[in-house]
Amino acid sequence: MNQPMAIDDLVSVAQAEAMGELDAPMMAIVLSSEQSYDLPINSLETDADKARWGLILRAAREHVEADAVAVLYPAWTTIRQKKPEPEAEQLTEDPAEDSGDSDNSPIDTLFVQLHTRDHVYWRGFEQIRDPKHQRIIGFRRIKALSTDYKRDEAPSVTAWLSTLFEPLPDEGEETAVDRELADLLEEPEVTAALYPRQMRALH
């Protein structure tokens, strides 16, 4: 899979999912060599939510032996200028940039991340809404969020996904984390959602 091409395809999928909605869906897509699988994410509000979903996505990735995981989610960002060494401790502190407007009001943003073994590809788009009905009708690219990182240099806001590609334990060795991963794969919300998705031009 050509990763720069894949992130562009994921952007198209994310925007298509959000168009016409009041809120963009929060979801992950596990990309294996054979199929793509959707996992709707119900919440990433707390550290506990992020820890749980970090384990679920690692379990799903290992289950289908995938080499990439995409995360699509809406959030607010307020920093419009890219810092030399961005520090993104919270979703609202992601480095962002618009067309030059000095307004410091929060930006209603759709984030698209593609995580591979070596890189994190990150894109952000301001969500344009119909003033009357507040539904999403378009997107404006946030240039400073069109950034590719080496995996070990990604902003700390992605730390909850740092275990996605940790090596499997030695044969015959089982740890508490591995037992928890196995249990997570049996949860109804995961088993119901882990189904093949035919994505446009992604493979």
Image (spheres, rainbow, N blue to C red):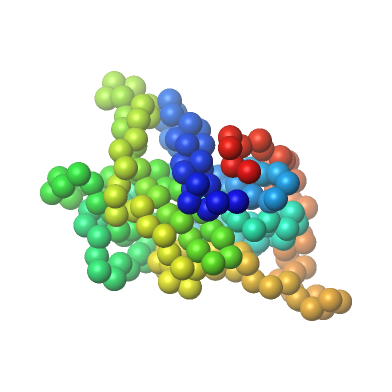
Q: Residue at point 29% right, 71% down?
A: 85
Side of 44 relative to 86 (left or right):
right
Measured as percent of width and height from the top left, residue 116 is found at 56, 60
Q: Relative to 50, say whether 18 is above or below.
A: above
Q: Residue at point 55% right, 51% down?
A: 2
Side of 22 relative to 189 (left or right):
left
Determine the residue located farthest toward the top in the rendered image.
132
Determine the residue located farthest toward the front in the rendered image.
2
Q: Residue at point 20% right, 44% down?
A: 99
Side of 167 relative to 50 (left or right):
right
Front one among 180 and 82: 82
Front one among 97 and 105: 97
Front one among 176 and 3: 3
Measured as percent of width and height from the top left, residue 163 is found at 60, 68
The C terminus lies in which quarter of the figure? top right
Examine the image and state in which quarter residue 68 appears: bottom right
Front one among 8 and 51: 8
Q: Is residue 143 visible?
A: yes
Determine the residue located farthest toward the left in the rendered image.
102
Measured as percent of width and height from the top left, residue 83 is found at 24, 65
Determine the residue located farthest toward the right in the rendered image.
172
Q: Is residue 40 visible?
A: no
Examine the image and state in which quarter residue 79 appears: bottom left
Total number of numbered discs in the rendering = 0
Measured as percent of width and height from the top left, residue 146 is found at 36, 52
Q: Residue at point 73% right, 58% down?
A: 65
